[in-house]
Image: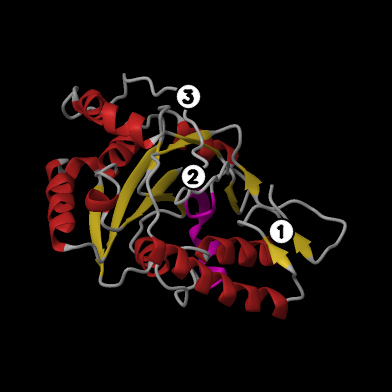
Amino acid sequence: MSVSVIINTHNNYSEKDGCIEAVVLSVLNQTAVDFEIIVVDNASIEKDRSILEKFISGLGSKNNIKLLFNIDNNVSVGRNLGYKNSNYNMLIFMDDDIFLEEKNVLHRVEIIAIGQKYGYGAIRKWTTEKWYNENKIDLYNSLKSMGEECYVSTVIPDPTIRRKKNCRHLLRTYIGNFGFIYKDVLASVGGWDEFFNGYGIEDDSMAFKLYMNYGTPCILAPIYVIHFSHKIKDKCYEQLIRNKQLFDKILHKNGIKCFHGGRLLYNEDLSIIEYL
């Protein structure tokens, strides 16, 4: 089976210290699976977009990676753009700050996904910003040290969860953060909901639509991925609140009180869907 890996990004160099380079290289490092990488830039500032273009073009065409541009900073629009330009039926969506430390992650997802419709909920470990800033050069060098062949020799220490303002404490991946959907399944639910502005809650909405149409997801644990920690701006919180209010209206129309984080756990009250 072949896999399309779709990575959305926005201002990664100015807001996340350019960690998308390590993310892309960690995907290129994957073995035992045929894949393409589609990077979608969601209206980054000119400087960030230029650096990203240079990085992607420097990887060479034989790595089967392409860069697309979305004129709006809307992750749902970007994800739809990515999947509509993909060549394979199995889609893996990733954020631009999710790192695959092990070489067989995509292959394991491919095996787990057999006979399934969609899945997510991989274990999400976290680095601290301090660790990332101190080790990113060694990490990048180790990824690039084989030239055209990428591999990881730097061992990332046990990541920690930072319990401070502007840091999300998410222990499992969302459907778009790191999850798989088959293209025909995604099309059947109408793709990603583009009426959510920016990013945030679109994962919940997609997980809810998939749950209502196909039942509970395939859970990707014990696969784990690593999240490069970063701050979240206040304007993003405000955006999340507005999107959450919109999503709540959708839930209430379907007789659902709560749908937390797109992670499913049965509750005695069938109108509540809780964390996994």
Q: Position of residue 254 (x, y in %)?
A: 73, 76
- Report the residue marked by disc 3: 158
Give how far apart the Cα atoms at labels 1 and 2 are.
Answer: 35 Å
Q: Position of residue 276 (x, y in %)?
A: 69, 47
> Where are the magenta residues, as a range?
174-190
Residue 30 to residue 203: above or below = above
Does the magenta portion include 228? no
User: Circle 1 sits on which residue?
Assistant: 215
Q: Are marks 1 and 2 in contact (CB under 8 Å)?
A: no
Q: Quadrant of residue 41?
A: bottom left
Label 3 Cα neighbours within 10 Å, binned few <14 / some 14-19 / many ≥20:
few
- State the SS at label 3: loop
Q: Real-space Cα distance between discs 3 and 1?
A: 34 Å
Q: Report crowding for label 2: few under 14, some 14 to 19, many 20 or more residues within 10 A (C-alpha).
A: few
Tag 2: residue type? Lys
Residue furthest toward the front?
165
Q: 66 and 157: which one is in front?
A: 157
Of the pair 127 and 66, the residue shown nearer to us:
127
